[in-house]
Amino acid sequence: MPSPTDMVRQPAQGMPPSGRPLDVHDPAKGPSYYDVSMLKPPVWKWQIATYFFLGGLSAGAFVLARIAERFGGEEFRQITRFGTYTAILAAAPCPLLLIDDLGDRSRFHHMLRVWKPSSPMNLGTWVLTAITPIAGAAALREFFRHRDHLRALPAASKVRRLVRRGERVLRRQAPPGMLNVVSGSIGVIADAAGVPLAFLLATYTGVLISNTATPVWTQNKWLSPLFAVGAMSTGATAIGLAMEMTRASGAPESRAERALRHFSTAAHVAEIAAFSGYLASLKGRIRHPFTRGTMKHHTLYTFAGLAVAETLKHWPASAGGGKLLKIAGHLASLSSAFSVRWSVVYAAHESGKDAEAARMVSRAKSPAQYGWLKGAERPERTAGIADPQAISTLDPALKINPRHR
Amino acid sequence: MTVKLPIFEKIVEDIREELENFPNAFPPRRTAAPDPAKQRAGLQDGQPVMGFLTDATLCIGCKACEVACKQWNQLPADGNNFTGNSYDNTGHLSETTWRHVAFKEKIGGAIGDMMGAGPTAGSWLMLSDVCKHCEDAPCLKSCPTGSLVYNPFGDVYVQPDICNGCGYCISACPFGVLGRSEEDGHAKKCTLCFDRQADAHVPACAKSCPTESIKFGPVEELRAYAEKRVAILRERGHTKAYTYGADSVGAYGRLNAFFILEDHPNEYNLPEEPRQPNRGQTTRYMLGSLAALALTGLAAALFSSKSRR
């Protein structure tokens, strides 16, 4: 029969009397509050990662399409054509993704009740709202300028008849030359307003997440270039993919394809440089989500995917036919870019829960200058115990769990 | 020669008024983007900015403030969590916890040193944490809907009828104060009892505090008081007492809900020097645009018809 005193819980071996390790800190780590993070992880999930990818792709394709029309000749028509369609197709699901991400989905339009460019999210919503109709108008213009689509449809098809009838009515009713004026204006608007807006669309996402307190994002200068070059790269790759899939087999490489191939090589190099620069800018433990944490495979995949994309592009077999190889290369490039956005979003989820990373990014740069320590001794970083082994010699009851070190 | 007819002027005036009011006819009302400087200037005559002073040297960790806050603001329970972190099973501020009592068992530190008890002396650190109602609030700057504003008492306030739950403020806050409610999806945080203040009541937490660790009042008065209080504390041997957030910290502006602490801010889960995340965003826009522009220039060169293959 155990006596009542035996019933009193005895501390486990190597544990302090409370039954769990006391909060004694690694002096190098400095003080902490039970390693509870002082920050909240982002609430953004797959919708935002996908939006970053599609929005960038849309902007990149749009810019390349406009550049090809302004600077390229007839040989580059295909880039304009596919780029214009890609831009609107990629932009179309973006509002849906953004709405789905909201806590209150019925209030998306509340972002359009104010003009507040100091908030990148507000600016971005306006940019997306402005560029979508421009990209849509450009796509319609492209559709009517290119009769191939109509010819490709069966002669009896309802769509073809409808479009033809619409065209006839327009021709008959509109004053002479008006259609040219409309088409020209759309082109000018797309160049003068659409291209700057597309630059903003490609860039603001990086600024948006860098305007946060999350350790992997906060005030990081590499994020906006990373997303901007990624946008151009994915835009070029999407156009290249569309051209490759519609190419007659055995046809020699056109000038447009060749230019696009060179461009995407440069864009891949820029992407690798920006992502490496971003990872290098994260110091020590802050980088861990990318190198040791949940996103380590994504980081590897990003670099591997870009390398595979480049290799397949220059593979001897892809010079001749090699359609499948080229398509695989394009897909590798696109998936790497997607992986970058995915890992940047989800690394922040891990980083936002990391108490040590949060303390690291909020360290005082020069403590002496701060008012809150004016006249006071600076509180010690260490919790008073420099050598944990010293405790056990002072008081045998206070043994530190080695697991906690 | 123009003939001025009062009736026309009246009509024109009416039409102009109608046009001006037109955007207000449909919810949500169109309002100007909140400009902190203007809003501050818009405080009514004689209305000072109101705030909190939370004194860690007086806190006994009773959690009366946490309970009073929950009751008054009708906040839901956080769930039956057991963190194992001393007497703190709440963990941190959140959408359902607007006052959080940090409860820390600490070996060594300021009090142990003061009592001359040596490095193994244990002490309890307690502090009632709350939204800091920053003078230059990152959440307010980031809010894309203009839901976050400075209210007529100069405090940071989430307008529940505007917030669409985008979650930007949650990531922007360097103190991790805001959270997104699972009930309605809106961002929630301390309102500094806007409703009680409007009826000339003291906020629920300050009202319930039995040791007057939480003090509520005009921020300027609180700052002056805090200075005196810190001087008294130091005189009495609490040589490490200091105010946290009464003055600006680096690039970060002052806090309208500030603290008197004795230990390192990280012991209370406060940042040493919170970052102002929006700072330097123009540079980041430029860097991104330059990168895109460089690649666009390359594309123009590659696509140019004149270039030979």
Image (cartoon, coloured by chain):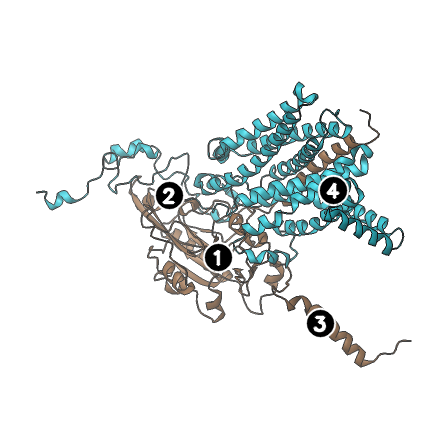
User: Which residue type carries mark 1?
Assistant: Lys
User: Tag on residue A154?
Assistant: 4
| Mark before the other along the chain sequence, 4 or 2 | 2
Q: Which residue is mark 1?
A: B188
User: Which residue type carries mark 3?
Assistant: Glu
Gap between marks 2 and 1 measured at Cα: 25 Å
In the rendered structure, the residue with mark 3 lies on which chain? B
Q: Which residue is mark 3?
A: B18
In the rendered structure, the residue with mark 4 lies on which chain? A
**Residue A200 sits in which quadrant?**
top right
- Residue A375 visible in the picture: yes
| Label 4 with label 1: CB-CB less than 8 Å | no
* Chain A tint as drawn: cyan
| Label 2 with label 3: CB-CB less than 8 Å | no
Tell whether B94 sits left or right of A183.
left
Q: Which residue is mark 2?
A: A34
Q: Position of residue A5 (x, y in %)?
A: 13, 44
Q: Position of residue A215 (x, y in %)?
A: 51, 40
- Residue B289 visible in the picture: no
Of badges 2 and 3, nearer the viewer stands: 3
Q: Nearer the viewer, residue B173 or B248?
A: B173
In the rendered image, residues at marks 3 and 4 fall on the same chain: no
- Characterize the local packing of mark 4: few (<14), some (14-19) or many (20 or more) Cα atoms within 10 angstroms: few
Gap between marks 2 and 3 measured at Cα: 59 Å
